[in-house]
Image: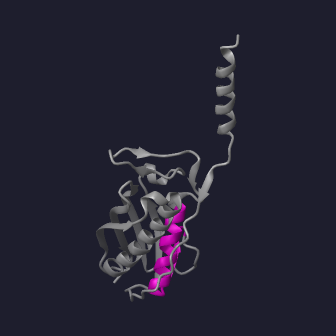
Amino acid sequence: MNFLKPILFGAAFALSSCGGTPDLYPVTPPKAVEAQRIAFRAVEVRDVSLPTYASANEIAVENLDGKLVTDAAVLWADSPERAVALELTRHLAQITGARVAPEPWPFEAFPDARLDVRFESLIASADGQLRASGQFFVSVADGRRERSGLFDLSVPFAADAGPKAIAAARGQVILDLAVYIARNGLK
């Protein structure tokens, strides 16, 4: 019977660690200091689509072998798709001075343009780079030229600094994306 004590103790320890509170990491968006004139007075951020691993609550990191590693005790403080859409909306409003809002459009007057952003990747790698790539689409109802484009951005972070550094890098890469879209998709 004494051989069961270590097994029961190990099982009890494993069960007790499952009930712990996870660590939540918010993204504090950096302040946009750049200004960019665009061709629209009002822009709706319709959809921000993230890959499955990037839309999960767990913060994923790509190890040197290319494997995505997560920890159920290390989570984003907000739903990633919602948070990225709101960050992008905030930055576009600050950069352009236009009325920018996420879907559903909260105003009576319709927007001049609608923006969809589809991420192919949004991943922190073990080599200290947070990479974002994908496509954006700008639809316009009044007959003006519709636009689309590709983006491939990266921001360095201290790989040994943990999730807080990844959160800061994600905030910066979304700001960089907003600047890129304002220059290349909304002019």
Residue 135 drawn above or below residue 110: above
Nearer the observer, 55 or 4: 4
Residue 94 percent coordinates (x, y)? 49, 83
Stretch in magenta:
82-104
Asked if residue 64 is among those painted magenta in the image, a careful observer would answer: no
Question: Splitting the image into 4 quarters, where does residue 11 fall?
Answer: top right
Question: Splitting the image into 4 quarters, where does residue 144 fall?
Answer: bottom left
Give the total number of marks visible in the rendering.
0
Q: Residue at x 67, y 15 (%)?
A: 4
Q: Please tell me whether the stretch drawn in magenta is mainly helix, strand or loop.
A: helix
Residue 136 percent coordinates (x, y)? 35, 67
Q: Residue at x 33, y 81 (%)?
A: 183
Nearer the observer, 137 or 164: 164
Question: Splitting the image into 4 quarters, where does residue 123 fall?
Answer: bottom left
Residue 153 percent coordinates (x, y)? 33, 67
Color theme of the render: one colour
Nearer the observer, 163 or 178: 163
Residue 2 percent coordinates (x, y)? 70, 13
Is 19 on the left or on the right of 158, as rendered? right
Q: Residue at x 31, y 75 (%)?
A: 146
Residue 156 drawn above or below residue 14: below
Residue 148 drawn above or below residue 57: below
The N terminus sits in image quarter:
top right
Is 54 on the left or on the right of 75, as rendered? left
Residue, far front:
2
Q: Residue at x 51, y 50 (%)?
A: 56
Residue 56 drawn above or below residue 157: above
